[in-house]
Image: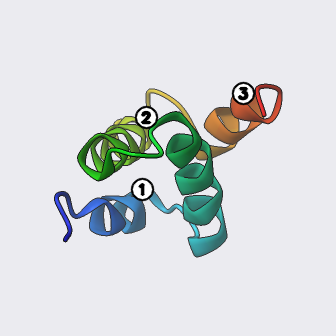
Amino acid sequence: MEYFNYEKVAQEAGISADQLTQLCQVIEHEFPNDRMLFELHVLRACMAVVQGAVTIEEILRENDNHY
């Protein structure tokens, strides 16, 4: 079941498939048992990139240090 179409927003943000996979791995680590929260947080991260609040590189770099 898909709750949110975060893939479409990721495309709009110019996030590559590899970057999206990395982002999903980071967020899945935070929400391993809740698919809806996982998808919501991926969507919110992608929307932040679309809005110019952050870059995908910044998100991934920040989370490199946590895991």
Name which of mark 2 and mark 1 comes first in the sequence: 1
- Residue 55: horizontal and vertical position, in percent? 58, 39
Whether 12 is drawn above or below 30: the answer is: below
Residue 31 as seen in the image, left or right of residue 58: left
Q: Secondary structure at mark 3?
A: helix
**How is this picture coloured?**
rainbow
Residue underneath mark 1: 13
Q: Nearer the viewer, mark 2 or mark 3?
A: 3
Q: Residue at x 22, y 64 (%)?
A: 5
Q: Which mark is residue 62?
A: 3
Name which of mark 3 and mark 1 comes first in the sequence: 1
Q: Residue at x 43, y 34 (%)?
A: 52
Amino acid identity at mark 1? Ala
Q: Quadrant of the N terminus?
A: bottom left
Gap in angstroms between the C-alphas marked 3 and 1: 18 Å
Residue underneath mark 2: 52
Residue 62 as seen in the image, left or right of residue 17: right
Gap in angstroms between the C-alphas marked 2 and 3: 16 Å
Whether 31 is drawn above or below 4: the answer is: above
Amino acid identity at mark 2? Gly
Whether 8 is drawn above or below 36: the answer is: below
Whether 35 is drawn above or below 1: the answer is: above
Q: Secondary structure at mark 2?
A: loop
Residue 53 as seen in the image, left or right of residue 62: left
Please give the count of numbered marks on the rendered protein: 3
Q: Residue at x 51, y 47 (%)?
A: 28
The residue carrying pointer 2 sits among few (fewer than 14), some (14 to 19) or many (20 or more) residues within 10 Å by Cα, namely: few
